[in-house]
Amino acid sequence: MTLTHAYEAPAPAGERLGVLDTLEAESIHIIREVVAEFERPAMLFSGGKDSVVMLHLAAKAFWPGRVPFPVLHVDTGHNFPEVLDFRDRTVERLGLKLVVGSVQEYIDRGELAERADGTRNPLQTTPLLDTIAAHRFDAVFGGGRRDEDKARAKERILSLRDEFGQWDPRNQRPELWNLYNGRHTVGQHVRAFPISNWTELDIWRYIAREGIELPAIYYAHEREVFRRDGMWRAVGEFSQPGPGEEVTVRTVRYRTVGDMSCTGAVLSEAYTVEDVVREVAASTLTERGATRADDRISEAAMEDRKKDGYF
Amino acid sequence: MTTELLDPAAAATGTLFRFATAGSVDDGKSTLVGRLLHDSKAILADQLESVARTSADRGFGGEAGGLDLALLTDGLRAEREQGITIDVAYRYFATDRRTFILADCPGHVQYTRNTVTGASTADAVVVLVDARKGVLEQTRRHLSVVALLRVPHVVVAVNKIDLTGYSEEVFARIEADVRRVAAELGLHDAVSIPVSALVGDNVVERSAHTPWYTGPTLLELLETLPNTDDEPDGGAAFRFPVQLVLRPQGALAPGLDAEAFRDYRAYAGQVVAGTVRVGDAVTVLTPGQEPRTTTVTGIDAAGLDLDEAWAPQSVALRLADEFDVARGDLIGAAGTLPAPTAALSASLCWLAPRPLRPGAKVLVKHGTATVRALVTAVEGRLDLDTFEVGPAGELELNDIGRAALRLAAPLPLEPYAAQRRTGAFLVIDPQDGNTLAAGMITAGTEAGANP
């Protein structure tokens, strides 16, 4: 049979598998297990680098078939337009169905209230849970990595959630060998984290190796920014400088991509993926520490959000 | 920002090494893990700042700038509030030679459950011993679990050696004790290292305080131990549990030629042992059916046409004969698969609050097959102190014991001692779906097999 090569990946070159090959094999195994054992899986896809890599792995897992589940995005209403555009193009390219849960609609209907600090990340939980319930998704893939945060460091690859989506860190199933137990009862669903064991650097090296396209804001560009909470924040529709916050034009890139209201840029000259790999390898700050206002609220910000049903 | 550091192209040269730590807070485990992360430069400035702030708040060390490295492994709010560790935490760091995944297993609460979990995927386990206390019952228990789980390498970190005045005699005595216990347990490869996590001796940097110790530091050892995938399983026979069938037909990925893939059919899975090559004869075992033998005609990795694949690669196999193959089937090198049996004997690590009693109806997940099963007998409980199996009528939470099970459908079962991946299974509660036990096959018995 003649096959068209859809992906460029180096053929294994020796007796052992390299780090990226081992991580890739583990992730593909997990994605396939979930698809085989669940009735209605879906994958969180925001256009952020981790979800882009996760979707790429899913495409590889089912090649030459199409990715056999819809992708789900909880739109805060404050997303970067170039990231939404990238999201739509990717969905189109892979022939996927996109399900969107909209924070803005909840605010407009008065079911969610804007927070005083303007951050919309914590507001994603209600639309997420409602969308999961409305579509009866029984497994939802998320691109969370254990190296990101200390709460994530303790979460299972298959994480059982009750009907309120809550994570109970004291009552997790032991996860043994490569045997994943996804059984659940009515009302429960499972969050699956196939890239749990990847680090930020692994992600970037894999993006470089596989030639994966990302939203342009991950690479250095000039932008009008102002300084707030020790971070560079973009000037935009949803993010305006306050009194005394001076606007300047800087060369920046985004290390994480989330809600515009809480994601900061870093000063960077990394114009290419190779530049970014070098920059991340040399970085002295964690990605969330460097760029996420919402994780600075308290030492346990992520833990608290997860217990409430967040990813 | 300097850009002379890592060459991105060097990314794929290292290998992944998974290890677990076992020991209690009193042994200084959190400090050891913190030291490993700190001295291998895995801790970034914002994390260090946060640790420095908290250390100062709590008056750690008395001196200015003292760092309580144990804080680096602090996890959840509940753990900080209660000063305990609830659960296995995973940590990541890399050196020029290797990328490490560390399963940090708490020692106090539910140590069996946590150590079993961490050890099940580990290439090595680092067991902590307090140099002032030597080999304790707890050490024996940790080593027993490591032996039972057949972790390839064991390292005993003899910690707090500074508090013995860097005594060579103390270390030599503990090392001899470790060697004796290891021999009793059948562990062939237990290496002891004198360390001080607090001061940093022999963790990453070689210590000037222990001139009598000429072996490697802990990190040097972890960098050079062979990992499971390099290990001779040595020519282990090919094993491939089928996860699902790839038959895209109408649902082809966009951009592919429908004509070329009209009859495409392949079996997706992860190679769990051995190597497979195009042209190899393989046997397909479907529960309840006669084994069938065919030839591998292709190995696909997302459009890449491979000549061979080996553990732990995830691939898709194309076979010469178009017979019915489904999830739960096992593909193996022809002539190497054991005959399916419906009766088995196993070691069980019981992980549930409700005890196991004979007559329990459970589910067994083995590879990608899940079948109903009946626990026909609880045959005994392992005494982790003596490593002997004594009589028992039931197994309680965190007990390790022997049990006999009868399966609703025969499966190709291999002893865990011969094959870590295909000898392992989960016991699952059919009602609430919880994982009840980690199972390791000691024997499949033909006698109970369905005809």
Image (tube, rainbow, N blue to C red):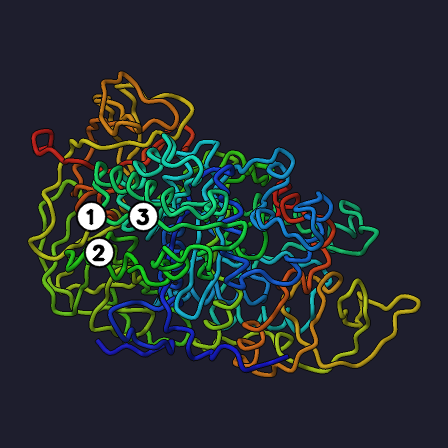
| Distance Cα–Cα, label 3 vs label 1 | 19 Å
Mark 3 element type: strand
Q: What element carries label 1?
A: loop
Instruction: Please determine whether, in this image, residue B43 is positioned above or below residue A123.
Output: below
Quadrant of image for the N terminus of chain A: bottom left
Q: Position of residue B315 (x, y in %)?
A: 29, 64
Residue A42 visible to the viewer: no
Compare marks 1 and 2 and give the one earlier in the sequence.
2
Q: Is residue B408 left or right of residue A305?
A: left
Name the residue that disc number 3 marks: B154
Residue at the spot of label 1: B419
Graded by Cα atoms within 10 Å as few (under 14), some (14 to 19) or many (20 or more), the crowding at tag 1 reads many
Residue closest to the far top: B393
Rendered image quadrant of residue A102:
bottom right
Q: Which of A282 and A17 is in front in this view?
A: A282
Which numbered disc flags the more N-terminal residue, 3 or 1?
3
Q: Which residue is found at the position 61% from the left and 45% from the top?
A: A306
Picture layout, residue B397 above or below residue B33 = above
Q: In this view, does B241 lie to the left or right of A189?
A: left
Badge 3 density bin: few <14, some 14–19, many ≥20, Cα 10 Å = many
Instruction: Respond whether the residues carrying marks 3 and 1 are from the same subunit.
Output: yes
Dot label at residue B273: 2
- Return the chain for callout 2: B
Residue at the image point whose x is 66% and y is 75% from the top: A253
Q: Where is residue A179 in the image (x, y as percent from the top left)?
A: 34, 45
Query: Gap in Å between the C-alphas at discs 1 and 2?
Result: 8 Å
